[in-house]
């Protein structure tokens, strides 16, 4: 390795290290795009159904968290509202064999 090659590598590695620091101030805060919805799920006949439903919902773009409750026949889904909407969640469960509807908000 010649001296010129060695300096070039050092120069490139120094540049790479400085790139993230130069852009650190350019981070723009995003508004809260999270939305949580509760789905009433049909056709749940056993506790194993919860795994199928959870996997189907996790495949939907923007889904961040899924909790499926066999006893209450519900799924609570948190997702990015700018990437998807509730109808996509319903389609995912329906395609998996578990039709769903949006649960009404709980009254206080």
Image (cartoon, helix red, strand yellow):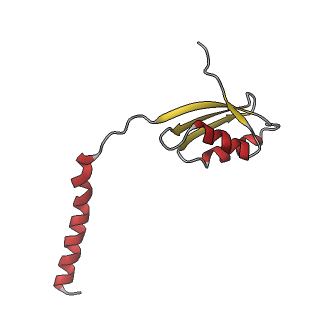
Residue reaching furthest to the bottom: 2
Task: Residue 64: give x, y in percent of width and height.
Answer: 54, 42
- Going by the image, does 90 lie left or right of 33? right
Question: How many callouts does the rendering have?
Answer: 0
Q: Quadrant of residue 106?
A: top right
Q: Is residue 37 above or below residue 16?
A: above
Task: Residue 19: give x, y in percent of width and height.
Answer: 24, 59
Residue found at x 59% / y 31% = 37
Q: Quadrant of the N terminus?
A: bottom left
Q: Is residue 15 above or below residue 45?
A: below
Task: Residue 107: give x, y in percent of width and height.
Answer: 61, 14
Residue reaching furthest to the right: 45
- Most foreground residue, 103 or 5: 103
Residue found at x 17% / y 77% = 7
- Most foreground residue, 18 or 25: 25
Residue found at x 21% / y 66% = 14
Residue found at x 77% / y 34% = 42
- Going by the image, does 11 lie left or right of 95? left
Q: Is residue 89 above or below residue 23?
A: above
Task: Residue 72: give x, y in percent of width and height.
Answer: 73, 27
- Going by the image, does 86 lie left or right of 69? left
- Most foreground residue, 23 or 11: 23
Q: Quadrant of the C terminus?
A: top right
Residue reaching furthest to the front: 87
Q: Quadrant of residue 32?
A: top left
């Amino acid at each position: 390795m010649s001296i010129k090659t060695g300096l070039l590598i050092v120069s490139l590695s120094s540049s790479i290290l400085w790139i993230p620091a130069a852009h650190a101030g350019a981070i723009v805060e995003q508004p809260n795009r999270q939305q949580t919805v509760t789905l009433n799920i049909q056709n749940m006949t056993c506790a194993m159904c919860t795994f199928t439903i959870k996997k189907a919902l996790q495949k939907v773009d923007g889904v961040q968290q899924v909790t499926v409750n066999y006893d209450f026949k519900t799924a609570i889904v948190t997702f990015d509202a700018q990437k998807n909407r509730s109808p996509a969640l319903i389609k995912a469960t329906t395609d998996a064999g578990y039709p769903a509807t949006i649960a009404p908000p709980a009254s206080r």
